[in-house]
Amino acid sequence: MTEPIEILPLSPETLDDVVCLPGGLELAGKAFQGDLSQVRAWHRARLSEGMRGIVAYAGGRPRGFVEFAPAETAPFPIVAPGACVLLCFHWAGTEPEDPAHLTEERRMLEAVLDAARSEFAGMATLGWNHPTHYPLALLAALGFREMVREEPIALAWLPFQAGVPAPRLAPARLRPRDLSGEGRLAVDAGWSARCPYSVSFAERLRAAVALQAEPDRVSLSERRIDTRDDAFEFAVSPWDWGWVYLNGRALNPFAFPGDALRREIARHVPQSPSRA
């Protein structure tokens, strides 16, 4: 039996109850680096642009949220006139593999879909070929259909009206650098203040580059992806708001905890002639 939840609209008054903001349940007991006040500022800025959603409470405690925005302002490279874009959803306080995690996220999404149907032509989003991280299986169960996939991410679409044009992804525009011909390593990174994990990783990456044995042979270029314009300008394939390339080769930003990130970057720095 699912726990009773109370749902309130996302607003300036409930914003601080989003579980991924400083003080929220998702951050409790975890170590983050960087200035997480940026996450709150990102949310307030998107609210001013028309972002909306819900905050869910269980036992009087904030546990989950869903955020969506009109496609015309949503910070994703999705073209969907008249539609909205599902930005983020999360239920905190359970292990991701716990069945309650997806059960509660589905309940929250159903509430948002009911609210969005009267205002928008449909809802688009980016789902993941992953069992618990924005899973395509959960979206499909809610009626979304997959439009195009760039593994592991797919554009998913749920029209609310007959005959509504399907959304499309903007093409990738950013070409990562390759400085291997100069004997240097180009580190191209994208991150967003929308998420504490992204803010923290960006700080870790800066430190990992600064600690290289020959830091002048590593060129770090960051793109902060916070707005719709940013999303279109810095689109990569498959699209995500957090990415890293080492001389043009994609690196999983979250696969190298602790000092492993510094070591992995060092492994990709071209060997200097003096050490050949």
Image (cartoon, helix red, strand yellow):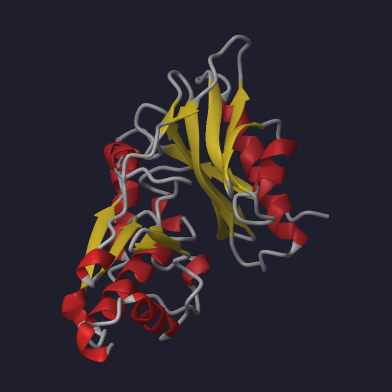
User: Looking at the picture, how far across and down is residue 254, in whole percent?
Assistant: 48, 69
Q: To which quarter of the image does residue 49 belong?
A: top left
> Going by the image, does 40 lie left or right of 84?
left
Relative to 163, say whether 182 is above or below.
Answer: below
User: Looking at the picture, how far across and down is residue 204, in whole percent?
Assistant: 34, 75
User: Looking at the picture, how far across and down is residue 271, in whole percent?
Assistant: 29, 81
Q: Nearer the viewer, residue 226 or 2?
A: 226
Could you tell me which quadrant the N terminus lies in? bottom right
> Going by the image, does 78 lie left or right of 144?
left
Q: Nearer the viewer, residue 197 or 101?
A: 197
Q: How many marks?
A: 0
- What residue is rendered at 25% in x and 59% in y? 222
User: Looking at the picture, how far across and down is residue 62, in whole percent?
Assistant: 54, 58
Q: To which quarter of the image does residue 123 belong?
A: top right
Q: Is residue 33 visible?
A: no
Relative to 232, say whether 14 is above or below.
Answer: below
- What residue is rendered at 16% in x and 77% in y? 216
- What residue is rendered at 48% in x and 46% in y? 238
Q: Is residue 25 visible?
A: yes
Q: Nearer the viewer, residue 258 or 32?
A: 258
> Going by the image, does 2 lie left or right of 29?
right
Relative to 177, say whether 182 is above or below.
Answer: below
Could you tell me which quadrant the C terminus lies in? bottom left
Q: Nearer the viewer, residue 182 or 240?
A: 182
| Residue sitting at the far top | 163
| Residue sitting at the far left | 216
